[in-house]
Image (cartoon, rainbow, N blue to C red):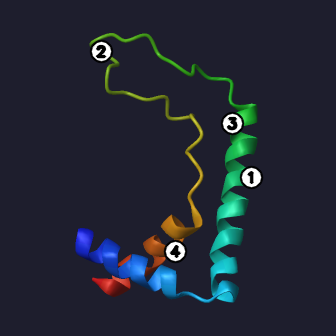
Amino acid sequence: TTVVAKLVSKEWKGLSDKKREVWDEKARLDKERYETEKATYTGPWKLPITIKNRNQKDPTTPMRPMSAFLSYSNSKRCGVR
């Protein structure tokens, strides 16, 4: 919910640079993983649109990398609720 997001955002802005570096490092590693997966991906980037596969995505497509804030907020979300 937006209340949880606002609380986590407030905590994120209050983090010291040293603690924020941990999350930036996790984001950097995830971005490297994404770039590696993207470079080795050989599947179809776009599937032809038909009624049968309209809402289906290729499960082998690399997932986008997580930002440092998103990684941090996912770890803190259950504690804030």
Q: Decide if residue 32 is in sight here.
A: yes
Q: CA distance from mark 4 to mark 1?
A: 18 Å
Q: Which residue is mark 4?
A: 72
Q: Quadrant of residue 38?
A: top right
Q: Are marks 2 and 3 in contact (CB under 8 Å)?
A: no
Residue 38's place in the image compared with 29, above or below, is above
Q: Are marks 4 and 3 in contact (CB under 8 Å)?
A: no
The residue under the point 44% across, 71% down is: 74
Name the residue type under label 1.
Glu
Dividing the image into 4 quarters, which one contains the N terminus? bottom left
Q: Which mark is residue 52?
A: 2
Density class for disc 3 (Cα within 10 Å; few <14, some 14-19, many ≥20) is some
**Could you say where residue 59 lies in the image, as x and y percent from the top left?**
50, 35
Q: Which residue is mark 1?
A: 32
Mark 2, secondary structure of its residue: loop
Report the side of 15 relative to 19 (left or right). left
Mark 1, secondary structure of its residue: helix
